[in-house]
Every structure is written in C-alpha cells, then in structure tokens.
Amino acid sequence: MSNIVNELVEGYIRNTLTDKEGLLRDLEIYALENNVPIVHKEVSELLKVLLKVQKPKRILEVGCAIGYSSILFASTLGDGVEIITVERNEKMIEKAKENIKLAGLENNITILEGDAEEKLKEVAGEFDMIFLDAAKGQYKLFYDMVIGKLKVDGLLISDNILYKGMVAHDDFVIRRKKTIVKRMRNYLDYICTCNYLDTSLIPIGDGVALSYKKAERGEINA
C-alpha cells in the first residue's frame, strides 16, 4: 500500500508543477527519449527555489551529463554566476557543449573534461554551492575533495541519495548494486552526523540531501 501511496503523491506533485519552457523543456524530452539521467522535475523546482534564496555566485557541479542542471542554475541566477562542472563521458560533454551554446551561457559555464577524481584537484577558489550528481558509489570520495572548497554558510546538495529506493530498504536492493548502496548509506550517515554540517534528507525525486556548512571542518569540537 505504501508504494501505491508514494506513486500517487509523486504523480500529484509532478502534475501540479508547471512544465518548463524553451530549451530546458527540450532537454527534458531529449533526456526521457534517450535515457539520460537529469534531475527530476520536482527536484529542479526545489533547486530553483534554493538558488533564488541563496543567490550563489560560484557553483561547483560534479556530474554534468547533457548540461541540464548547469543551464538551470545559470538561467535562474542570470549574469554574474560562474558554474564549473565536471564530466568524463565524451558523448555527454559534446551534447552539453552544444546545449550550453544554444542557451548562450558559454561565459557562465565551464566544463572540466575528465574523471572527477582527477579534475577536482584542479579546481581553485571557494564556492557558495556544490551539487553532487555523479557516480553514486563515490559520493564520500567526492565530498572529501570538495567540502574544503565550500564556503561557510554554503550549501552542499547531493542528488539521487535513495538510489531508486535501494538505500531505504534491503528489500529493494539488487545484488550487483550492494556495494553502491552500502557506500551511499555510509555517506548519508556521515553527513547527517557531521558536527560542522546541518543536513536534511528530502524524499522527492530519487532523494535529495541538503547540507548547510556552518563551520570549517575541524573547527567544532565533537
């Protein structure tokens, strides 16, 4: 019964929210037709609200895909925002560049091409917001590489934390995904108990974690 309720609630939310227009809508259709993972509709609306409240000037994104979320960020915030995004899939990079050019946002969005574990070492400066949306089994690794780049009072957003529901309950876990699920659970346990973060887990889309950085790592006694 709970699964039916969840599906009905999810359907209601998605049907109630207004559809995107223009390029973003075209990208949603492309992603659906080509099985490209982008943020869920309800998550994209949450992101828009968070962007308008926080008004970040620099955003670091781990996982670009076809550029949907980067374009969403830049089009919501307007001129002056700088977005650095990392992607290793060459086909995705080519499509993302095409989409970013169509959006006229080449001056706002920079794609670092290659493996995130290597490219994140090249990223300099501080960021107001960091968005994790790459390999789900590597979130803790990426976190350790980027959390020092997030300003105090900044926001870390981790998408797909429920990993198709598998993180929430063992009954949903596919055998070959056990390692990813275990790592994601460990990541969530960490950010929810970390003394320099305030974290909220939100069960929309495939799950979103919002982590507010209230101090630098190591500044607060355990």
Image (tube, rainbow, N blue to C red):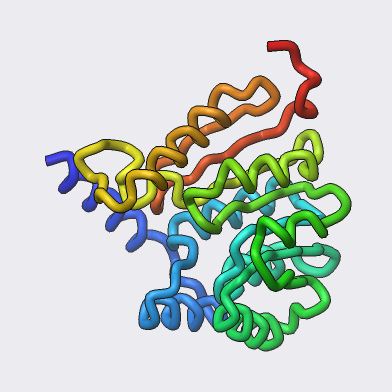
Residue drawn where x is 42% and y is 46% of the image: 207
> Could you tell me residue 97's position as x and y percent?
67, 83
Residue drawn where x is 76% and y is 16% of the image: 220
Tell me the quarter of the picture where residue 169 sits: top left
Which quarter shows the N terminus?
A: top left
Q: Is residue 114 left or right of residue 25?
A: right
Tell me the quarter of the picture where residue 213 sits: top right
Q: Which residue extends farthest right?
A: 125
222 vs 47, nearest the viewer: 222
Tell me the quarter of the picture where residue 104 sits: bottom right
Q: Is residue 184 left or right of residue 212?
A: left
> Could you tell me residue 124's position as x and y percent?
86, 54
Is 17 situated above or below 175? below
Q: Which residue extends farthest left?
A: 1
Is 199 situated above or below 97? above
Q: Is residue 43 left or right of residue 77?
A: left
> Could you tell me residue 6's position as x and y percent?
24, 46
Residue drawn where x is 42% and y is 80% of the image: 29
Residue drawn where x is 27% and y is 49% of the image: 9
Which quarter shows the C terminus?
A: top right
